[in-house]
Image: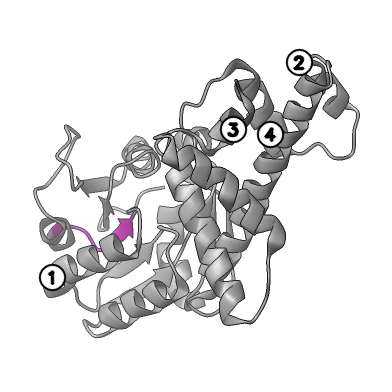
Amino acid sequence: MAEENIAVGVLGLGIIGSRVAQNLRDKGWKTFVWNRTPQEHPDVLDSPGAVAGQAQVLQIFVRDGDALLSVVDAIAAQLGEGHVVLNHATVSPAATNEAALRVSKTGAAFLDCPFTGSRDAAEQGKLNYYVGGERAVVERIRAVLDASAQTVTLLGDIGHATVLKIATNMISATTVAILSEALAVCEKGGVDPQKMEQALAVNGCASGLSGMKLPTMLTGDYLPHFSLKNMLKDANFGLALADQSGMKLPVLSSAATAMIQQMEAGRGEDDYSVVFENFRD
């Protein structure tokens, strides 16, 4: 339930941010929004600073670390002890920590708060948030998260949620990459790829992700639930974290190579399951 004295700002109106803003409005929250590319939305303001001047809780949905830090700098002059800034973008741990530092200098609180769940989950208010930061701050704004959440998982320090989100996206990227290869092997072996749905229905290798992606891959429907460019970005974060620790990630490296092939084909805005097109004639 919305709290009368709290307004929420949503900064970034992409696939997820726009739907989170709609969920907030539908559930009675006073909501102000901003997007880098001007859009027609209720309660849209012309700058991040203007939103911060109206809203106490600020949810940031931008693409990368540079965009995150740009937004943080744009709202800094308006921030104070009454504000809580939540970063929902999947960025590098370094960018997460830098954003937290810049926010803390204003007296505002910061939460590292990436999510799992794509377009449909956002529309249904069923995102799953991973949260790093002080528990007291999380509880203070928990009702805001609940407006668009199915679950909220607390993970301790700032940065921990970012690492976990990168790790889960590693699994998603490699799952879709190997599913693409399996479908291609079926085609080349003379097996109707449509039979894969029947096979997975009774096979332990099936997952919620394969159940969601397989039907659209079979029809060539790559309407983005999560874009290829963003999944490749997150895979590269995983590879960078591994490199810093002296680890090799051959499976993720292979998936990244598959994604790069479709990026070079100009498919970066499509759903990341477009990697199946690597095998289409």
Q: Closest to the observer: 52 or 90?
A: 90
Above or below, comparing residue 118 to residue 101 in the picture: above
Residue matched to label 1: 78
At mark 2, the secondary structure is: loop
At mark 3, the secondary structure is: helix
Label 2 environment density (alpha carbons within 10 Å; few <14, some 14–19, many ≥20): some
Q: Which quadrant does the C terminus fall into?
A: top right
Residue mark closest to the camera, 2 vs 1: 2
Mark with earlier residue (1, 3) = 1
**Residue 130 at x, y = what percent?**
55, 62
Mark 2 vs mark 4, CA separation in Å: 13 Å
Mark 4 vs mark 1, CA separation in Å: 48 Å
Above or below, comparing residue 265 to residue 80 in the picture: above
Label 1 environment density (alpha carbons within 10 Å; few <14, some 14–19, many ≥20): some
What amino acid is found at the position of numbered circle 2 in the picture?
Gln
Mark with earlier residue (2, 4) = 4
Asked if residue 59 is among those painted magenta in the image, a careful observer would answer yes
Mark 1 vs mark 3, CA separation in Å: 48 Å
Q: Closest to the observer: 224 or 39?
A: 224
Residue matched to label 2: 194
What amino acid is found at the position of numbered circle 1 in the picture?
Gln
Query: Is label 4 in contact with label 1 (beta carbons under 8 Å)?
Result: no
Residue matched to label 3: 278
Mark with earlier residue (2, 3) = 2
Query: Residue at point 62% right, 62% down?
Result: 167
**Residue 63 at x, y = what percent?**
35, 53
Above or below, comparing residue 120 to residue 199 in the picture: below
What amino acid is found at the position of numbered circle 4 in the picture?
Ser
> Which region shows up in magenta?
54-60
Query: Is label 4 in contact with label 3 (beta carbons under 8 Å)?
Result: yes
Label 3 environment density (alpha carbons within 10 Å; few <14, some 14–19, many ≥20): some
Q: Is residue 263 left or right of residue 179?
A: left
